[in-house]
Amino acid sequence: MPLTLPARRNRFSIAATSMLLIFLFLFRLPAWAEPLPADEADMHALLEKSLSVVEIDKEIIRIQEQKQQLMLTMTDTEKQLLIQEQQIADKQEEAGNVLRAYYMGERDFLLSALLSFDSLSELFQMLDYAEIILTQDKHTLNTYVEQYKKVKVGYEKLEARQNELSTIEQQLKTQRERVVALEKQLDEQLAGRSDADRIRILMKELTSYWETAGIAEVKQYFRALSKAMQKLPSWVQENKQLLEIKGFQYTIRVPEDDLNTFLREQNDIFNHFSFEFIDDKVIAQGKRDNMEIKISGHYTIENDPKNAILFHVDELIFNGFSLPDTTRSALEKEFDLGFYPDLIVSFLKANAVEMKDGELTIKLSLKL
């Protein structure tokens, strides 16, 4: 049956409103903009939760893959242990016989033979026999001890992996509980809305946009940053005015304007991006092709496995939508945004890092 004019208008109105909301929320909602009206804020919160569900689901898949790989490793370890235990069982009886022989005095004949020679040639012959027997006994005992050590190390590895598996299973449980809680909140909040179907469409549109374009854009920035950070030590060396030396104390001061200039020299993508140092925070934000990204984080000094200044992502916002900690953590693992002082001078290590008044300050000292 053809649609009546009012029905057509209603259908057109819904479609137009949907497209308007998609445009509004995907392209014009930077998180650092003015506060949203109550209705828009509710809509924004719903869409953000739906995006978090998708991202946490990805983390669940990653943890499940990690768990599966670990269980395969544990199975291989258990198989190796069975083989090693069989080998040690074979040698255990031999080692026991050797020890029993010494304990029961069955090797006393060696001493008697060595003391009852009639000539030097007999003595040397007895010494050769004794050496052969003692060498064989020693080899038997050493073989048993080495195999015992291998089994012990194998069990220690298995125990460590069992502990790791327990941690992974707890992580998996935690993330699943987060997803269930978020989905429950979404269902409850949508249940009382007349525009629930339209919002679900927006959720799918947002998810699709993030997965097809958004994450690729974010990763492009992180990839460019990672490559640029590899060149930062040599850039500091070339710009001596950034390095202060007082006795055995070294200080690197990097103004945000200088850092932005350096980054733009490395990659044109940073022409649309800028960094700020405010109150021990690094804030980077920019807009390109209708996509706005904001990253804020902080640096910490780490000494394991080596001295480094590592960057931690505290907040990641895409077109006004805050991504969950699982996304931030995954990006940290995939892209190294750290700074390594020993690449400037091999005998230096970082002691402190500070960000304020538009400047990054790194204090270094000699390695002891």
Image (cartoon, helix red, strand yellow):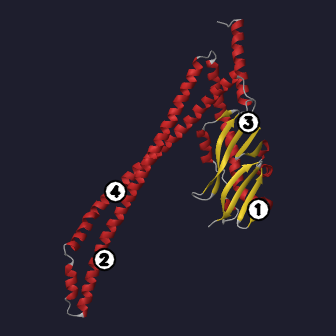
Query: Of marks 2 and 4, which one's residue comes earlier in the chain?
Result: 4
**Residue at point 69%, 65% (across, down):** 345
Q: Can residue 3 be spotted in the picture?
A: yes
Q: CA distance from mark 2 to mark 1?
A: 65 Å
Q: Are marks 2 and 4 in contact (CB under 8 Å)?
A: no
Q: CA distance from mark 1 to mark 4?
A: 61 Å
Residue 227 on image: x %, y %: 70, 52
What residue sits right under mark 1 in the picture? 244
Q: Residues within 10 Å of mark 1 (few under 14, many from 20)?
A: few
Which numbered disc covers residue 352? none
Query: Of marks 3 and 1, which one's residue comes earlier in the chain?
Result: 1
Left/right placement of residue 68 relative to residue 333 reads left
Residue sticking out furthest to the bottom? 119
Query: Of marks 1 and 4, which one's residue comes earlier in the chain?
Result: 4
Which numbered disc covers residue 135? 2
**Residue at point 59%, 20% (across, down):** 190
> Could you tell me which secondary element the residue under label 1 belongs to?
strand
The amino acid on which the numbered mark 1 sits, given as a three-letter code, is Glu
Q: Residues within 10 Å of mark 2 (few under 14, many from 20)?
A: few
Q: CA distance from mark 3 to mark 4?
A: 58 Å
Q: Quadrant of residue 21?
A: top right
